[in-house]
Image (tube, rainbow, N blue to C red):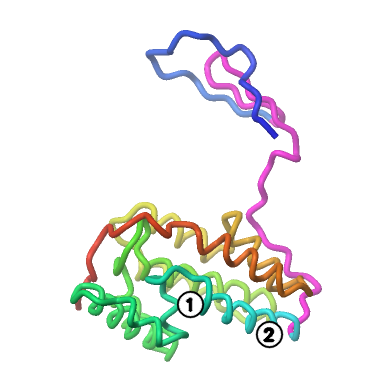
């Protein structure tokens, strides 16, 4: 479906900043009006009511298989499939993989701050892979808290404070992750994991998520500590 041009759009370019006004049905930028209805709104929250724990466990196994077969070659899937370490060939890449592995092990072994120091800002991409791993961990903490009623909010806040750095994209992503506010493809995957009885739905949403950032390239080297 195409997106309509805003009402009142003119052919000439504006050379000054226009005023922004948002109502329940319209976004106005200067003389331009963008009408919208509730169906245009995206809700980033996740409804976890009625989740079947056995279905989630099974779907996580399906996701693990999808990571092993469909994740990009130099993704962090090597953490669950050691054979993928062969894709990291240069000295930089091997050092990156080693640091990520050490940080992940420490984070999951009950040494979160030590693990965060090794993961923070480490790797490839607009949001470095180490920051992506931390964000995934924060999302996991949020889901466990909501499903089991465990008080993990303080743990998430501690991890977030330790993980913040100079990358504004990573900082925003981490903040949203700890609060369970999800972008579209991540939410689709979690819905499939929590609610779907279709293994194909898990694989399809996982592959859509894998495609994001696959070719964004390096942005920062490993932050050696």
Q: Out of 40 and 75, give the one closest to the viewer.
A: 75
The residue wearing badge 1 is 155
Say which quarter of the image contains residue 72.
bottom left
Indicate yes or no whether the magenta region holds residue 38: yes
Q: Out of 195 and 65, give the one closest to the viewer.
A: 65
The residue wearing badge 2 is 57
Say which quarter of the image contains residue 32.
top right
- Report helix, strand or loop for mark 2: helix
Image quadrant containing the N terminus: top right
Q: Residue 48: x percent and y percent?
A: 73, 69
Reading the chain from its start, which is encountered first: label 2 or label 1?
2
Left or right of 5, for residue 221: left
User: How many C-alpha atoms fall within 10 Å of the one at disc 1: few (<14), some, or many (≥20)?
Assistant: few
Q: Residue at x 34, y 63 (%)?
A: 128
Q: Is residue 94 above or below residue 163?
A: below
Q: Residue at x 21, y 74 (%)?
A: 90
Look at the magenta stretch and give its main secondary structure: loop
User: Which residues lie in the magenta part?
Assistant: 24-53
């Amino acid at each position: 479906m195409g997106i309509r041009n805003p009402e009142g759009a003119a052919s000439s370019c504006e050379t000054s900043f226009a005023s922004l006004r948002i109502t329940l049905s319209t976004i106005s930028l200067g003389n331009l009006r963008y009408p919208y209805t509730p169906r245009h709104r995206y809700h980033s929250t996740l409804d976890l009511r009625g989740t079947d724990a056995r279905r989630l466990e099974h779907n996580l196994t399906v996701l693990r298989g999808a990571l092993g077969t469909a994740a990009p070659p130099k993704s962090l899937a090597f953490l669950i499939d050691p054979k993928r370490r062969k894709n990291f060939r240069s000295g930089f890449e091997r050092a990156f993989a080693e640091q990520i592995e050490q940080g992940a092990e420490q984070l999951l072994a009950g040494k979160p701050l030590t693990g965060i120091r090794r993961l923070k800002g480490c790797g490839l991409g607009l949001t470095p892979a180490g920051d992506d791993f931390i964000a995934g961990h924060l999302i996991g903490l949020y889901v466990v808290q909501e499903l089991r009623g465990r008080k993990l909010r303080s743990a998430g806040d501690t991890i977030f404070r330790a993980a913040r750095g100079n990358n504004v994209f990573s900082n925003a992503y981490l903040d949203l992750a700890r609060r369970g506010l999800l972008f579209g493809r991540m939410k689709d995957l979690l819905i499939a994991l929590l609610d779907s009885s279709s293994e194909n739905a898990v694989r399809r949403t996982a592959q859509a998520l894998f495609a994001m950032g696959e070719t964004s390239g390096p942005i920062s080297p490993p932050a050696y500590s």
